[in-house]
Image (cartoon, rainbow, N blue to C red):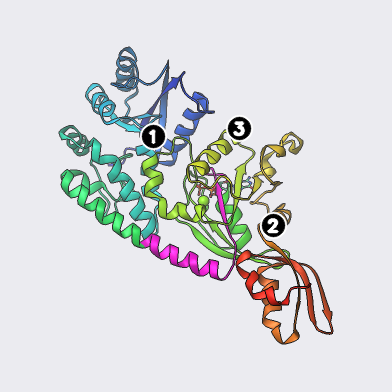
Amino acid sequence: MNRGPERAYLVAVEATKTDTVWSVEDSLNELEALARTAGAEVVGTMRQRLSHPDPATYLGKGRVQELSDAEMQLNCDLIIFDDELSPTQQHNLEKLLNARVVDRTALILDIFAQHARTREGILQVELAQLEYRLPRLSGQDLAFTRQAGGSRGATGGVGGAIGVRGPGETKLEIDRRRIRSRISELKENIEDVRKQRAIYRRQRSEQAIPVVAVVGYTNAGKSTLFNTLTEAGVLVENKLFATLDPVTRHIVLPNHQEILMTDTVGFIQKLPTKLIAAFRATLEEVVEADMLLEVVDVNHENAIEQSETVNEILEDLDALAKPRVTALNKMDLVDDPEDIDTSLYPNAVPVSALQNRGLDRLLHKVADVLADTMERVDVIIPYRKGDLVELFHRRGQIVHEEHQVDGVHIVGRLPHSLRGYYLSYAES
Ligand SMILES: Nc1nc2c(ncn2[C@@H]2O[C@H](COP(=O)(O)OP(=O)(O)OP(=O)(O)O)[C@@H](O)[C@H]2O)c(=O)[nH]1
Ligand SMILES: [Mg+2]
C-alpha cells in the first residue's frame, strides 16, 4: 500500500509569558522543516495566543474542537504540537482527536532514529525514546501504538509512522518493568562508550593535541565545513540532524600546528533535556574540547536566534566560556555581505564551506585563538634534542626560530602540558 507522505497539521501556542527569542512564526517554520525532514507533508497550521499552554489540553477547549473539525476536513494523519506535551495533555488530546498526536520532542526523536548510524548513536536514541515513552505508556498508548503500527522494519528505522518508529518501537508493547530494565541496560552500554571516549581523550591530552569541537545549529553547515577542512566524507544532507555521532579528524593549521577537529550533533531550540542527557557521551566531546568552532548559517533569517539557542545550550553544558571562533557560513548565498554584522559573534570569519572560501583565514583565526590558550616560551634546545624541536613544530606555534652555535633558539607558544619538557632549556 503506497499512500504517499503522511499528512501533518501543525499546532503552536504563542505563549505571552516566555523568555524565548523565537517568534511563533519562526518556530512553526522550523517545525515544518522538521516535519518534512521526517517525511511528512504539512497541510495546515493553527496557533493560539495564551499566557501559557493549557495544562490539560495544550490549546484552549474551543480551539481543540476547531482542530478536530480541521483534521477531518483535511484528512490528517497526524497533528504535531510545537512543544513537548505532558503525558496528561497527550492523553487528553488523543481522546479528543482522531489523528495521531505527536509533539516536537517525538518528532525530533523520530528524525534522530532515522539518522542514527553508529552503535553509540543508536544506543543514545533508544535511551531517549524509552525515557520519553515511559511516563506516557498506558492502555491508551497501547491502542495508539496498534493504530499507528504499520510496517515495523527489521532495523526499526525507516518505514514506520512518524513519531512511533525507531529502535524502541517493538518495546512499546512490553510493560513498564521491561522498559525500565532496558533503560538501565542501555545506560550501562552508554557508560561503556563514555569510558572508552574518556580513555581516548586522556591519550589525546597526553599528546597535547588541542581539540576543536565544531558546534552550531542544525543544518548550519558543520559537516560541510568539517569535510572541506578534512576531506573526511562525513554525511552531509540538507536535512535537520544529518549528523548524530561525533567524528574526529586530524588537521594541520597553516602554521603547521596539529589539531583534532570533531564534528558534532546539531543543536535546536526546545531541545528536550532528556535528550541532552541521553546524548551526554556525544556532547562530552564539546564539553572537553579546548576550543569551539561555531558554524552559523548567516543566510538563515533566524541566524541570530539560532546562535542565541546555541549559546543557551553551551551554557547548560557549561561550555560557554570556552575560547571560540565563529564561521559565518553560506556567505555565497548572501547578497550584500556588508549587511552582516560580524561583531555579533566572537572571532567571526565569513566563509563558504561549500565553495571553499575563507577557510584559510578561518584556520589562521583558529591558530590565533588557540595561541591565547598556550604559554609563551623562549628556549635554546641543544642539537642532540632534535625530537623536541620537531615536537615544538607539530604541537606549538613558532614565532621565531634561529640556529645558533649552542642549539636551536625558539620563541613561541606551547600547550601547558608540554611546557615541562622544555623548562631546562629556558632562556634566562
Ligand atoms: N550555499 C551553501 N550551502 C551550504 C554551505 N555549507 C553547507 N551548505 C548546505 O547546507 C546543508 C546542511 O549542511 P550540513 O553540513 O549537513 O549541516 P550540519 O550543520 O552538519 O547539519 P546537521 O548535522 O544536520 O546538524 C547542505 O545542503 C549543505 O550543502 C555553504 O557554504 N553554502
Ligand atoms: Mg552534520
Classed neighbour count for the residue bearing mark 1: other residues with Cα under 10 Å, few (<14), some (14–19), many (≥20)? many
Where residue 339 appears, as percent x and y from the top left, is 73, 33
- Of badges 3 and 2, nearer the viewer stands 2
| 172 shown above or below 261 | above
Picture quadrant of residue 176: top left
Residue underneath mark 1: 104
Residue underneath mark 3: 301
| Badge 1 or badge 2: first in the primary sequence | 1
In magenta stretch: residue 214: yes
Classed neighbour count for the residue bearing mark 2: other residues with Cα under 10 Å, few (<14), some (14–19), many (≥20)? some
Where residue 152 appears, as percent x and y from the top left, is 25, 48
Mark 1 and 2 residues: CB-CB less than 8 Å, in contact? no
Residue underneath mark 2: 363
Tell me what residue is drawn at x 49 percent, y 29 percent: 27
Q: Which residues are magenta?
A: 193-220
Mark 3 and 2 residues: CB-CB less than 8 Å, in contact? no
Alpha carbon distance from label 1 to label 2? 37 Å
Tell me what residue is drawn at x 70 percent, y 68 percent: 256
| 255 shown above or below 238 | below
Secondary structure, mark 1, is: helix
| 144 shown above or below 262 | above
